[in-house]
Image: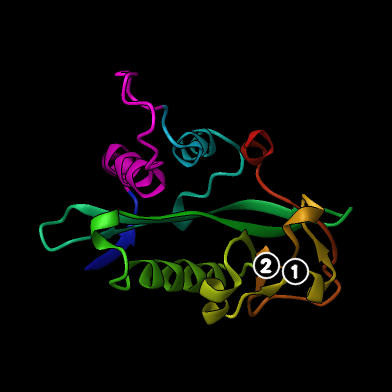
Amino acid sequence: MLIRRETRSDIDAVRTVTSAAFAKSDTSDTLNSSPPPPPVEATLLDELRISDGWLPALSFVATGDRGEVIGHVVCTRGHVGSDLALALGLGPLSVHPAHQGRGVGLALVHAVLGAADAFGESLVALLGSPAYYGRFGFRPAAEYGITAPDPAWGEYFQVRTLTAYQPTVKGPFRYAEPFDRV
């Protein structure tokens, strides 16, 4: 496996991986032969790419032995507090189902966090499983005085501080604009 920055030629493969990773397995409507709509995460990724929040240097793919895209992660521009302190929102993180449980997601998250730190970013926020993301140093955002866009998210809204973090960064977190439509 190789982790590298996404290129324009990866976009279709990333969409395919994201769609497969988030596909619903509901087969209860077997009479309806129309294809299911794309998962919201795939649509979100398309919208993020054309938004002001897109940061190409923080979009990574994992490739398999034959160079095929098997996973993807992205961080986009976010803000914290009324002074709009710069921050990042992580997600979506996608691993093709055939490659899940093999460390692909782990490698992608380590890569994007390392790059974000190297670029001087202060923190990364996400909505996800505390059991999974805790291994990367994510903690409930409330511990840092950062509030989720939706209070119902509770401990699932998490923050990972980076080297440039200043404890004065507090307040509501705001994702890149396309997240508002999810």
Percent across and percent down for residue 77 are 63, 51
Asked which secondary structure carries label 2, the reply is: strand
Residue pictured at 26% horizontal, 40% vertical: 9
> Which quadrant of the figure has residue 164?
bottom right
Q: Is residue 43 above or below residue 90?
A: above
Q: Nearer the viewer, residue 155 or 171?
A: 155
Residues under numbered marks 1 and 2 in contact, where contact means CB atoms less than 8 Å apart: yes
Q: Which residues are magenta?
A: 7-36
Residue at the spot 23% in from the left edge and 57% down from the top edge: 98
The one of 50 and 108 positioned closer to us in this rendering = 108
What's the residue at 66%, 64% (across, down)? 156
Of residue 123 and residue 131, the one placed in the foreground of this image is 131
At x 72%, y 75%, the residue is 165
Asked if residue 133 is among those painted magenta in the image, a careful observer would answer no
Q: Is residue 26 above or below residue 65?
A: above
Left or right of 168 on screen, residue 29: left
**Is residue 29 on the magenta stretch?**
yes
Residue 49: where, in percent of width, then height?
49, 38
Mark number, residue 141? 1
Q: Which three-letter amino acid code belongs to the residue tagged 1?
A: Ala
Rendering coords of residue 56 (x, y %)? 46, 49
Query: Quick one: SS at disc 1?
Result: helix
Q: How is the image coloured?
A: rainbow
Mark toward the start of the polypeptide (1 vs 2) = 1
Position of the N terminus by quadrant: bottom left
The amino acid type of the residue labelled 2 equals Gln
Q: Left of 57 or right of it: where is 116? A: right
CA neighbours of label 2 inside 10 A, class few (<14), some (14 to 19), many (20+): many
Which residue of the protein is positioned furthest toward the left in this rendering? Answer: 66
Are there few (<14), some (14-19), or many (20+) residues within 10 Å of tag 1? Answer: many
Residue 80 vertical position relative to residue 41 in the rendered view, above or below: below
Residue at mark 2? 158
